Image (cartoon, rainbow, N blue to C red):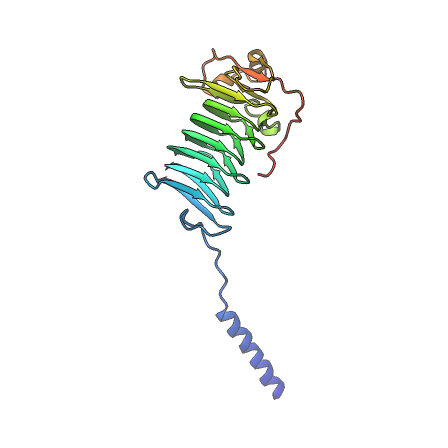
Amino acid sequence: MKKLIYSTACILVILFSNGCHRKKDTPGPYNYANVPDGGTAVIENSNLSGNGLIVNKANTTFVLKGNVVLDDLSIIGNVVIEPGADVQVKGLVNIAGGAKLTIRGKLSCTNFTQIGDIYLSGAHLIVTNQFTNSGGTKVYLENSKISVEDLRILGSIVSLQNDATKNGNIYSLIYFTGTDLYLNRAGGSTICGPVVFTYNNDMGASQVKTTKVNDTVIAAKSNFFTLYSIPDTESLYQFDDQNCTPQISPTGF
């Protein structure tokens, strides 16, 4: 009898425990304004103009989808712009040291200051004024286009060589557009991989020469100008860096 009572009591305890136990829900995406440490906020089809500077804090992730409008954006953690997204920042985009920005859609801004690394894949980055690639930082390019008026290169630009580029555009493009073009490549900066420029009047101290490569590019990708929606009268230049090792994938992304 005692064994029966003991067994029955154990069964009741187990049933009661299972009935009262609730599985802890995994929280969904947070709002960008209150995303906690380690959390992710999704900003989708949102016009946040008038809200001033939006700060992506350390150890947080923003995922931007659809059409998004911001005044200014400061990235201290991680930001991902999804394929098909069209993100307009009216003023400045700043990527802090250790921060990461991945662009798979379109991002436009007035000024772009990079102290952390960025990765563009099938992307278009439009900087209508000044783009500063700071020392020690990297721009990783994969089938991507950067449109810029004023470009200052102190770090590295790495155009990836992998199956995606081999079967895609092969080259990435730095397209200079505007009324006051400026290119300054500092000594010690590096440019590696299949990336071409439409402007080669380097005012910096790199002393790295360029070669006009229109024929080479067209031989590799006959519809290059159409792919990037630029006039076929543009001259294409490639920097003649000698000491660089092509990369297959971006480091840290």
* 33 horizontally vs 3: left or right: left
47 or 178, nearer to the observer = 178
Picture coordinates of residue 74, whole percent (x, y):
45, 39
The residue at 45%/52% (across/down) is: 28
The residue at 61%/25% (across/down) is: 188
Occupied quadrant, residue 192: top right
46 or 223, nearer to the observer = 46
The quadrant the N terminus occupies is bottom right
The residue at 46%/42% (across/down) is: 63
Q: How many marks?
A: 0
| In this view, 221 is above or below 32 | above
Occupied quadrant, residue 157: top right
* 252 horizontally vs 128: left or right: right
Which residue ends up furthest to the left in the rendered image? Answer: 50
| In this view, 33 is above or below 8 | above
187 or 181, nearer to the observer = 187
Which residue ends up furthest to the bottom in the rendered image? Answer: 1
Picture coordinates of residue 65, whole percent (x, y):
42, 39
Picture coordinates of residue 155, whole percent (x, y):
57, 29
The residue at 33%/38% (across/down) is: 49
The quadrant the C terminus occupies is top right
| In this view, 72 is above or below 214 | below
Picture coordinates of residue 106, whole percent (x, y):
44, 31
